[in-house]
Every structure is written in C-alpha cells, then in structure tokens.
Amino acid sequence: MTYRIIQWATGGVGRAAIQGIVNHPELELVGCRVYSKKKAGRDAGEIAGTHALGVAATSDVDALLALDADCVLYSPLMADAAELERILRSGKNVVTPLGWLYPWRGTDFAALEVACHAARVTLHGTGIHPGGITERFPLMISALSGSVTHVRAEEFSDIRTYAAVEVVRDIMLFGKTPEEAARSPMVSFLSGGFFQSIDMVAAELCVTLDPEKRSAATRSRWRRSR
Amino acid sequence: MATKPIDSPIGAIAPGRVAAQRFTWQGAVRGEVFMTARTNWFMGEEHLDPAWSFGPEGERFEVEVTGDPSVRVSFRGLHPASIAEGLERNRGIVATAMHCVNAIPYVCRATPGIKTYLDLPLVAGRGALGLR
C-alpha cells in the first residue's frame, strides 16, 4: 500500500519532509503547497534538493484540497486552525509539528475532532520538543520505573544554528537588552505545546496536577568588558 | 572577554545584550514540581554573564524519570556539527520532519479522530532504499 501525500509548506521542515517522503517505501508525494510566487510552479523535488518528482508546487489551496491524497504533512510557519479544519474536511488525514499533541484543554479541538469524524480522517500532532523528547520518550522510559516523583525533558542547544533568524531576533529577542527581551512572547507562544505535553505525561502516569502550571524565562548577557 | 560586539547569525550583538535564554514550563502536585520541560538556548558558551554552559556533555536533549529506579537518557546527534551546517540543514529540523513522515502510515491506518502517541501503535522509521 502506498499512501499519497501532500507536503504543506517548504521551509526547513517541509524540505526535509519531502526528502523523507521520497525515501519512504510506503509514501508518494502528490502535491506541494508553497507560499511564495518564487516557488509556485517549481518542481517540489527541486525545491527540496532531491531529483525532479514531477510534482509542481502550487499556492492554489482549492486545487490541492481537490487532489486525491491520503495525508497532508502540515508544516507552515504558523498553524491556521481554520485552514487545518478545511484540510481535514476535504477527507485528508493530517500530521503536523505545530501542536495538537494532546489538545483536550484547547479551544479549537472540538471543531477539529468533529471535522475528523465527519470526514473519517485522523489528526496527529508530533515534533521533537515538544512532540517527542517532552512526552513520547519520557512515557516510554517511565515503563522501566515505578513510583515516579519527577519527569524532566530538557534541551541544550546553540541557538546560532537555528536558521529562522527572524524568530531568533524579532520574537525571541536575542541581542536586545534584558528588559526588552523580558517582553518576548516566546515563552507564552510555546506554552501551549509544552503544557499539552506535561498534561499528557501526568494523565498517563495517573498524576493529578494542580490546575495552575508555571512558566519562567531567565537570561544571560554577553559579558561586558572592563 | 567581549570588548566589542560579537558576531552572530542575527548580526553583531553588543556587550550587555541578551545572548542566552532558558525557558521553563512546570506542572506541580500540591505545589511540588512533578514535571519540568526546559529549553537552554545559548549563543555559544563563551562570554556569558551569568557564565552558563551546556556542561561536559555539550548540546543534547535529555530525558530523566525520577522513580524506582531513576532513569536518564541523553539524545545526541540531533544537533548540527557546526553553525554553518545547522543553518544549511539542521539535524533537529530533519528529525522533526522525519517524526512526522514516519507517523504517516500509522495515522492513515488509524480510526477517525485526533490521535496522540497514546492512541497510535509504535511509530518506526524505515530502512534505506538500497537495503530493500
């Protein structure tokens, strides 16, 4: 059985996903959503740096939704729940690294769950951190342990390797004064995903969390010269 | 010692400006922390005040379950070997993409609805093309 896939957006994740789809024995790329005029009409394989795939990238959403496809890998810069619902209602399963890891407390899950059942499709949220490191692997590792009192998932990364410079500069506010950076929306922007992961781990481990969760940001500066 | 602005992919950063950030999310039970998720995002490990570092293990992801017994796993290989490599093709981004790609067959075979890791069977990768 080969599943027919549409790749939605061709940023870092999208280009790597096209490479992965091409090399996966059960998957075939049949459509590719792009957002810039520069990319529209180009071969999806060429955009992803593989061989030509005979799939022309397009920004025509209606044409993509009309395609006979089994699944959309939905990875634009920002998720649009209304657009996601349209994709599901067109009869396509969706896998996305943009949330919906464990969305039962969210405001948009009811509409998406209804759309899934109406069109008989599945929505699955995944990723890396959150979306793997934060809950999938802690849950797996917890199977080797009993009487669990604490779970920790932690990332140690050199942010200079992150190619989305606009995010690093304009949203995370690196390079700003500590007072300016304290106004970054990044922690609350990421809270939705990380708190879903914490909810998933606690629920499966039969732990009842306090209703209020905490988030915090601390910062270090370039050292001043003497 | 930083005596002048230091170069970074977002441009030169002056001394005194933010070069490392640590974000933490926690859930607690009756005030006692039960789960901690944290990102340590640093522009390198030099010239930082406070003098934060990744520790001897360097860049990584870490998962720790405290219990009987306590277990700790360190994930290496999900970080690029150099800044230039990361900007070109970041292994963490590739892993994110592959986690999505590899889930697709299982998601296509699932019953309708929003499905999490707790609902789907074990998701695995696939062998290289030449090995089939």
Image (cartoon, rainbow, N blue to C red):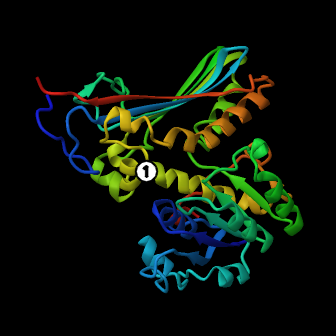
Looking at the figure, which quarter contains the N terminus of chain B?
A: top left
Residue A38 position by quadrant: bottom left
Q: Estimate the x, y position of residue A36 in percent, counting from the top left.
A: 46, 77
User: Is residue B127 left or right of A15 when viewed as pictured?
Assistant: right
Residue B15 position by quadrant: top left
User: Is residue A21 left or right of A166 when viewed as pictured?
Assistant: right
Residue B22 position by quadrant: top left
Residue that label 1 marks: B91
Q: Estimate the x, y position of residue A162 in percent, counting from the top left.
A: 38, 50
Subunit ID for the residue under disc 1: B
The residue carrying pointer 1 sits among few (fewer than 14), some (14 to 19) or many (20 or more) residues within 10 Å by Cα, namely: some
- Seen from the viewer's position, the closer of residues A103 and A25 is A103
Residue ID at (49%, 42%): A186
Q: Estimate the x, y position of residue B65 in percent, counting from the top left.
A: 62, 22
User: Is residue A20 left or right of A117 when viewed as pictured?
Assistant: left
Callout 1: SS: helix
Q: Count the marks: how many?
A: 1
Where is A150 relative to A175, above or below? above
Which residue is situated farthest in the right direction here?
A: A118
Residue ID at (45%, 39%): A183
Looking at the figure, which quarter contains the C terminus of chain B?
A: bottom right
- Seen from the viewer's position, the closer of residues A89 and B97 is A89
- Regarding residue A110, the answer to whether it shows in the image is yes
Where is B69 relative to A84, above or below? above
Residue ID at (53%, 85%): A56
- Regarding residue A157, the answer to whether it shows in the image is no
- Seen from the viewer's position, the closer of residues A203 and A107 is A107
Q: Estimate the x, y position of residue B2 in percent, counting from the top left.
A: 15, 32
The three-letter code of the residue at mark 1 reads Arg
- Seen from the viewer's position, the closer of residues A80 and A98 is A80
